[in-house]
Protein backbone atom coordinates (compact mmCIF):
# COMPACT_ATOMS: atom_id res chain seq x y z
CA UNK A 1 0.00 0.00 0.00
CA UNK A 2 1.35 3.42 -0.97
CA UNK A 3 2.07 5.93 1.78
CA UNK A 4 -0.21 8.99 1.86
CA UNK A 5 0.96 11.67 -0.55
CA UNK A 6 1.38 15.32 0.39
CA UNK A 7 1.41 18.07 -2.22
CA UNK A 8 3.55 20.99 -1.06
CA UNK A 9 2.32 23.98 -3.06
CA UNK A 10 4.92 26.68 -3.58
CA UNK A 11 5.14 30.05 -5.27
CA UNK A 12 7.87 32.62 -5.91
CA UNK A 13 9.15 33.60 -2.47
CA UNK A 14 8.12 30.42 -0.69
CA UNK A 15 11.13 29.32 1.36
CA UNK A 16 9.95 26.58 3.73
CA UNK A 17 8.87 23.99 1.16
CA UNK A 18 11.93 21.76 1.49
CA UNK A 19 11.67 21.60 5.29
CA UNK A 20 7.94 20.94 5.10
CA UNK A 21 8.40 18.14 2.58
CA UNK A 22 11.08 16.63 4.82
CA UNK A 23 8.70 16.77 7.80
CA UNK A 24 5.98 14.89 5.90
CA UNK A 25 8.50 12.27 4.82
CA UNK A 26 9.75 11.87 8.39
CA UNK A 27 6.10 11.33 9.34
CA UNK A 28 5.82 8.44 6.88
CA UNK A 29 4.30 10.21 3.90
CA UNK A 30 5.45 10.89 0.36
CA UNK A 31 5.94 14.57 -0.39
CA UNK A 32 5.91 16.31 -3.74
CA UNK A 33 6.81 19.97 -4.15
CA UNK A 34 4.73 21.58 -6.91
CA UNK A 35 4.87 25.15 -8.22
CA UNK A 36 1.48 26.88 -8.31
CA UNK A 37 1.78 27.46 -12.05
CA UNK A 38 2.44 23.77 -12.68
CA UNK A 39 -0.71 22.90 -10.75
CA UNK A 40 -2.69 25.50 -12.67
CA UNK A 41 -1.59 23.87 -15.93
CA UNK A 42 -2.34 20.35 -14.67
CA UNK A 43 -4.92 20.46 -11.85
CA UNK A 44 -5.18 16.66 -11.99
CA UNK A 45 -1.88 16.53 -10.06
CA UNK A 46 -3.94 17.12 -6.91
CA UNK A 47 -6.07 14.04 -7.59
CA UNK A 48 -3.18 11.77 -6.63
CA UNK A 49 -2.64 13.43 -3.25
CA UNK A 50 -4.41 13.17 0.08
CA UNK A 51 -2.79 16.18 1.78
CA UNK A 52 -2.27 19.70 0.46
CA UNK A 53 0.08 22.02 2.30
CA UNK A 54 0.86 25.68 1.69
CA UNK A 55 4.15 26.27 3.52
CA UNK A 56 5.72 29.38 4.98
CA UNK A 57 7.80 32.06 3.33
CA UNK A 58 7.20 35.38 1.62
CA UNK A 59 5.12 34.45 -1.41
CA UNK A 60 5.55 37.02 -4.19
CA UNK A 61 7.59 39.05 -1.72
CA UNK A 62 4.44 39.84 0.30
CA UNK A 63 4.59 43.10 -1.65
CA UNK A 64 0.92 44.06 -1.14
CA UNK A 65 0.21 42.13 2.05
CA UNK A 66 1.30 38.77 3.34
CA UNK A 67 -0.09 36.00 1.12
CA UNK A 68 -2.35 38.36 -0.84
CA UNK A 69 -1.03 37.71 -4.35
CA UNK A 70 -0.69 33.96 -3.81
CA UNK A 71 -4.26 33.81 -2.50
CA UNK A 72 -5.55 35.80 -5.49
CA UNK A 73 -3.80 33.45 -7.88
CA UNK A 74 -5.30 30.42 -6.15
CA UNK A 75 -8.80 31.87 -6.14
CA UNK A 76 -8.75 32.84 -9.81
CA UNK A 77 -6.85 29.90 -11.30
CA UNK A 78 -7.38 27.02 -8.88
CA UNK A 79 -10.49 27.84 -6.86
CA UNK A 80 -12.48 24.88 -8.17
CA UNK A 81 -9.51 22.52 -7.82
CA UNK A 82 -8.97 23.44 -4.17
CA UNK A 83 -12.68 23.25 -3.33
CA UNK A 84 -12.87 19.83 -4.98
CA UNK A 85 -9.83 18.64 -3.03
CA UNK A 86 -11.34 19.82 0.25
CA UNK A 87 -14.81 18.45 -0.50
CA UNK A 88 -13.52 14.97 -1.31
CA UNK A 89 -12.05 14.81 2.21
CA UNK A 90 -8.47 15.86 1.56
CA UNK A 91 -6.49 17.46 4.37
CA UNK A 92 -5.34 21.06 3.92
CA UNK A 93 -2.60 22.64 6.03
CA UNK A 94 -1.37 26.23 5.89
CA UNK A 95 1.74 27.25 7.83
CA UNK A 96 2.50 30.93 8.55
CA UNK A 97 2.30 32.49 5.06
CA UNK A 98 0.19 29.47 4.15
CA UNK A 99 -2.26 30.30 6.96
CA UNK A 100 -2.55 33.82 5.59
CA UNK A 101 -3.23 32.37 2.13
CA UNK A 102 -5.92 29.95 3.38
CA UNK A 103 -7.80 32.75 5.10
CA UNK A 104 -7.72 34.95 2.00
CA UNK A 105 -8.75 32.20 -0.42
CA UNK A 106 -11.92 31.45 1.55
CA UNK A 107 -10.86 27.91 2.42
CA UNK A 108 -10.78 28.88 6.09
CA UNK A 109 -12.89 31.17 8.29
CA UNK A 110 -15.55 32.47 5.97
CA UNK A 111 -18.79 33.98 7.23
CA UNK A 112 -21.40 31.17 7.10
CA UNK A 113 -24.11 33.64 6.06
CA UNK A 114 -22.31 35.64 3.38
CA UNK A 115 -19.29 33.52 2.43
CA UNK A 116 -17.07 36.55 2.99
CA UNK A 117 -13.70 36.48 4.72
CA UNK A 118 -14.27 36.97 8.44
CA UNK A 119 -10.69 36.88 9.71
CA UNK A 120 -7.33 38.31 8.79
CA UNK A 121 -3.70 38.14 9.90
CA UNK A 122 -2.69 41.73 10.50
CA UNK A 123 0.61 43.41 11.30
CA UNK A 124 2.09 42.55 14.70
CA UNK A 125 1.17 45.12 17.33
CA UNK A 126 4.89 45.69 17.94
CA UNK A 127 5.30 46.83 14.34
CA UNK A 128 8.25 44.46 14.10
CA UNK A 129 9.10 41.12 12.59
CA UNK A 130 9.15 38.53 15.40
CA UNK A 131 11.36 35.43 15.35
CA UNK A 132 11.29 33.40 18.58
CA UNK A 133 9.84 30.40 20.39
CA UNK A 134 6.34 30.42 21.88
CA UNK A 135 4.33 28.11 24.11
CA UNK A 136 1.06 26.82 22.72
CA UNK A 137 -1.98 25.02 24.07
CA UNK A 138 -4.60 22.92 22.28
CA UNK A 139 -8.26 23.21 23.22
CA UNK A 140 -11.13 20.81 22.43
CA UNK A 141 -11.50 20.63 18.68
CA UNK A 142 -12.22 18.36 15.71
CA UNK A 143 -8.81 19.38 14.27
CA UNK A 144 -7.11 16.16 13.13
CA UNK A 145 -3.67 17.80 12.99
CA UNK A 146 -3.57 18.50 16.75
CA UNK A 147 -4.70 15.10 18.01
CA UNK A 148 -2.82 14.05 21.14
CA UNK A 149 -1.14 17.43 21.67
CA UNK A 150 -1.57 19.45 24.87
CA UNK A 151 0.95 22.17 25.65
CA UNK A 152 4.08 22.39 23.52
CA UNK A 153 6.51 24.85 21.99
CA UNK A 154 7.15 25.94 18.41
CA UNK A 155 9.06 28.80 16.77
CA UNK A 156 7.34 31.72 15.05
CA UNK A 157 8.76 34.01 12.39
CA UNK A 158 6.44 36.64 10.96
CA UNK A 159 5.63 40.32 10.70
CA UNK A 160 1.89 39.88 10.01
CA UNK A 161 0.51 37.24 12.35
CA UNK A 162 -2.01 39.08 14.51
CA UNK A 163 -5.29 37.18 14.31
CA UNK A 164 -8.24 39.55 13.95
CA UNK A 165 -11.93 38.85 13.42
CA UNK A 166 -14.13 41.31 11.53
CA UNK A 167 -16.81 40.73 14.17
CA UNK A 168 -15.16 40.30 17.61
CA UNK A 169 -18.31 38.66 18.97
CA UNK A 170 -17.57 35.69 16.71
CA UNK A 171 -14.53 34.82 18.82
CA UNK A 172 -16.50 32.99 21.49
CA UNK A 173 -18.72 31.32 18.89
CA UNK A 174 -15.77 29.97 16.91
CA UNK A 175 -13.94 28.91 20.06
CA UNK A 176 -16.98 27.04 21.37
CA UNK A 177 -17.21 25.25 18.01
CA UNK A 178 -13.56 24.16 18.32
CA UNK A 179 -12.46 26.22 15.33
CA UNK A 180 -9.82 28.18 17.27
CA UNK A 181 -8.01 25.23 18.83
CA UNK A 182 -4.49 26.60 19.12
CA UNK A 183 -3.59 29.50 21.42
CA UNK A 184 -0.50 31.18 22.80
CA UNK A 185 -0.10 30.63 26.56
CA UNK A 186 2.34 31.65 29.28
CA UNK A 187 5.76 30.02 29.49
CA UNK A 188 7.19 28.16 32.49
CA UNK A 189 7.95 31.47 34.21
CA UNK A 190 4.41 32.75 33.72
CA UNK A 191 5.35 35.19 30.99
CA UNK A 192 2.85 35.61 28.10
CA UNK A 193 4.18 34.36 24.77
CA UNK A 194 1.67 35.92 22.35
CA UNK A 195 4.16 37.35 19.82
CA UNK A 196 1.84 39.50 17.74
CA UNK A 197 -1.11 40.71 19.82
CA UNK A 198 -3.54 38.18 18.33
CA UNK A 199 -7.17 38.51 19.39
CA UNK A 200 -7.93 35.86 21.98
CA UNK A 201 -4.28 34.73 21.80
CA UNK A 202 -5.25 32.72 18.70
CA UNK A 203 -2.32 30.96 17.00
CA UNK A 204 -4.26 28.63 14.68
CA UNK A 205 -7.73 27.94 13.29
CA UNK A 206 -9.55 25.10 11.55
CA UNK A 207 -12.75 24.60 9.59
CA UNK A 208 -15.80 22.84 11.14
CA UNK A 209 -14.57 19.43 9.93
CA UNK A 210 -11.12 19.83 11.45
CA UNK A 211 -9.54 18.84 8.13
CA UNK A 212 -8.50 22.33 7.03
CA UNK A 213 -6.06 23.93 9.48
CA UNK A 214 -3.85 26.98 9.50
CA UNK A 215 -1.33 28.14 12.11
CA UNK A 216 1.23 30.90 12.43
CA UNK A 217 3.97 28.87 14.25
CA UNK A 218 6.28 26.61 12.24
CA UNK A 219 5.94 22.90 13.13
CA UNK A 220 8.41 21.90 10.39
CA UNK A 221 11.13 23.69 12.37
CA UNK A 222 10.74 21.46 15.40
CA UNK A 223 10.68 17.85 14.29
CA UNK A 224 13.85 16.89 16.22
CA UNK A 225 14.65 17.72 19.83
CA UNK A 226 18.02 19.10 18.75
CA UNK A 227 16.22 21.97 16.98
CA UNK A 228 15.04 23.36 20.33
CA UNK A 229 17.35 26.00 21.84
CA UNK A 230 17.50 24.24 25.23
CA UNK A 231 17.83 20.62 24.11
CA UNK A 232 21.28 20.00 25.64
CA UNK A 233 19.92 20.62 29.12
CA UNK A 234 16.36 19.31 29.30
CA UNK A 235 15.38 17.40 26.16
CA UNK A 236 16.32 13.91 25.02
CA UNK A 237 18.32 14.53 21.81
CA UNK A 238 16.95 11.32 20.29
CA UNK A 239 13.31 12.32 20.84
CA UNK A 240 11.12 13.82 18.12
CA UNK A 241 10.13 17.48 18.33
CA UNK A 242 6.53 18.39 19.07
CA UNK A 243 6.02 19.72 15.56
CA UNK A 244 6.45 16.28 14.04
CA UNK A 245 3.19 15.17 15.67
CA UNK A 246 1.22 17.52 13.41
CA UNK A 247 2.62 15.82 10.30
CA UNK A 248 2.25 12.32 11.77
CA UNK A 249 -1.40 13.05 12.54
CA UNK A 250 -2.01 14.16 8.95
CA UNK A 251 -0.38 11.05 7.51
CA UNK A 252 -2.28 8.74 9.87
CA UNK A 253 -5.59 10.43 9.09
CA UNK A 254 -5.18 9.72 5.38
CA UNK A 255 -3.50 6.31 5.53
Image: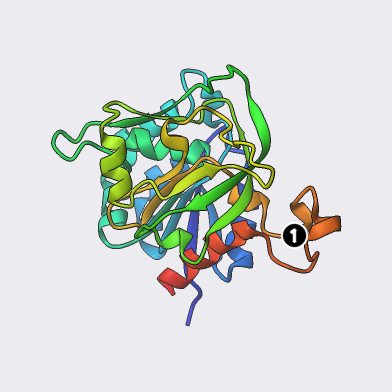
Classify mark 1: helix, strand or loop.
helix
Furthest residue to the front?
Answer: 190
Q: Look at the picture and state if 101 lies above or below 142.
A: above
Give the camera-side residue of 73 and 243.
243
Q: How many marks?
A: 1
Residue 177 in the image: state x and y as whole percent: 28, 51
Q: Which residue is mark 1?
A: 225
Residue 153 in the image: state x and y as whole percent: 63, 50
Quarter in which the C terminus is drawn = bottom left
* Label 1: how many Cα within 10 Å (few below 14, some 14–19, many 20+): many
Residue 125 in the image: state x and y as whole percent: 53, 20
Q: Residue at x 26, y 35 (%)?
A: 170
Colour scheme of the picture: rainbow
Q: Residue at x 59, y 67 (%)?
A: 27
Q: Residue at x 48, y 56 (%)?
A: 7
Q: Is residue 158 left or right of residue 168?
A: right
Furthest residue to the bottom?
Answer: 1
Furthest residue to the right?
Answer: 232
Q: Is residue 45 left or right of residue 29?
A: left
Give the camera-side residue of 108 and 41.
108
Amino acid sequence: MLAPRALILRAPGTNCDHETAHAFERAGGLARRVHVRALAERPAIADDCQILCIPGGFSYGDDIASGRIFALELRTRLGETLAKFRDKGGLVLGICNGFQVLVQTGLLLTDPATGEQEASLAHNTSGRYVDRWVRLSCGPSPCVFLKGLGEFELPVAHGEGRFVLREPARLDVLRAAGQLPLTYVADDLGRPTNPNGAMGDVAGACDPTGRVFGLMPHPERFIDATQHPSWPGRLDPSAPGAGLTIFVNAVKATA
